[in-house]
Structures are given as structure tokens and as C-alpha cells.
Image (cartoon, rainbow, N blue to C red):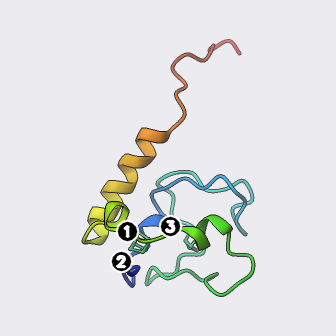
Amino acid sequence: MLCRAGCGACCIEPSISSAIPLHPLGKPAAVRCLHLDVANYCLLFLEASRPAVCNNFQATIDSCGNTQMEAMSILAEWERLTAPDTTNENPNG
Ligand code: SF4
Ligand code: SF4
């Protein structure tokens, strides 16, 4: 499918582990990328500094659904399912 104009859900819900200009340590989940403009377009779209993970993300019905709200919900769920399991970590380090 074609990316839905003005959606931006994949620039908000997923965490991004690679560095992004203004997000040198990457972006946590459910945090709006600082390069997403008010109309939900990527300000780095034509820039060499746009991360590979962003260039490579393909819009599909499975990830993007039929509306922005659906995409937000799907991507938030994927993020939850793929988050590292920290339940067995030793709290004393
Ligand atoms: S979630 Fe999908 S439709 Fe929305 S901006 Fe990202 S790629 Fe495009
Ligand atoms: S750099 Fe652009 S495509 Fe990547 S998360 Fe930020 S706004 Fe979205």
C-alpha cells in the first residue's frame, strides 16, 4: 500500500534504537519524533541524515491498517510484544 499522507503513526509509536538528529540515543516508544511536523510529515524526508530504519519502513496493511488510529494501535501493540523482557533482571544490579 502507499503510505497514508499526514499519518505519521510510525514516527510516534515505535521505538527507534538508531541515532536520529535531535534524538542521538534513538527514540523511545510512544514519543513523537522531533522531525515530524505539525501536519505529520517527516522534515528529514529528502535528507541524507534520515535514518535507514525510516527509509526502509514499508507501509503495509498489516502495520498501517486503514486509518491513522488503527496504525497507532497496531504499532503500539507490536512495540509491546517486542519490548525486551526485564522481569527477570536483578533489581540489585
Ligand atoms: S504508519 Fe504506515 S501509513 Fe502511517 S505514516 Fe507510517 S508508513 Fe505511512
Ligand atoms: S526521522 Fe522522519 S521518518 Fe524517521 S521517525 Fe522521525 S519523522 Fe519519522
Q: Nearer the viewer, mark 3 or mark 2?
A: 2
Image position, residue 29 (x, y; %) = 51, 51
In the rendered image, which residue does mark 1 sit on? 60
Q: Quadrant of residue 4?
A: bottom left
Image position, residue 49 (x, y; %) = 74, 76
Q: CA distance from mark 3 to mark 1?
A: 15 Å
Three-letter amino acid code at the position of disc 3: Cys
> Which residue is nearer to you in this view: 17 or 63?
63
Dot 2 falls on a residue whose secondary structure is loop
Assign the N terminus to one quadrant of the image: bottom left
> Which residue is nearer to you in this view: 36 or 54?
54
Q: Name the quadrant where ligand 2 sits.
A: bottom right
Mark 2, ligand 1, within 8 Å: the answer is yes
Mark 3, ligand 2, within 8 Å: the answer is yes
Residue at coordinates 72% horizontally, 60% vertically from top-left?
Answer: 19
Assign the C terminus to one quadrant of the image: top right
Residue at coordinates 72% horizontally, 53% vertically from top-left?
Answer: 25
Horizontal relation, residue 83 to residue 25: left or right: left
Residue at coordinates 31% horizontally, 56% vertically from top-left?
Answer: 73
| Above or below: residue 80 compared with residue 60 | above
Query: Tag 3: Cα neighbours inside 10 Å, few (<14), some, or many (≥20)?
Result: many
Q: CA distance from mark 2 to mark 1?
A: 5 Å
In the rendered image, which residue does mark 2 sit on? 1
In the rendered image, which residue does mark 3 sit on? 11
Three-letter amino acid code at the position of disc 1: Thr
> Which residue is nearer to you in this view: 89 or 65?
65
Dot 1 falls on a residue whose secondary structure is loop
Q: Is residue 76 visible?
A: yes
Image position, residue 71 (x, y; %) = 33, 63
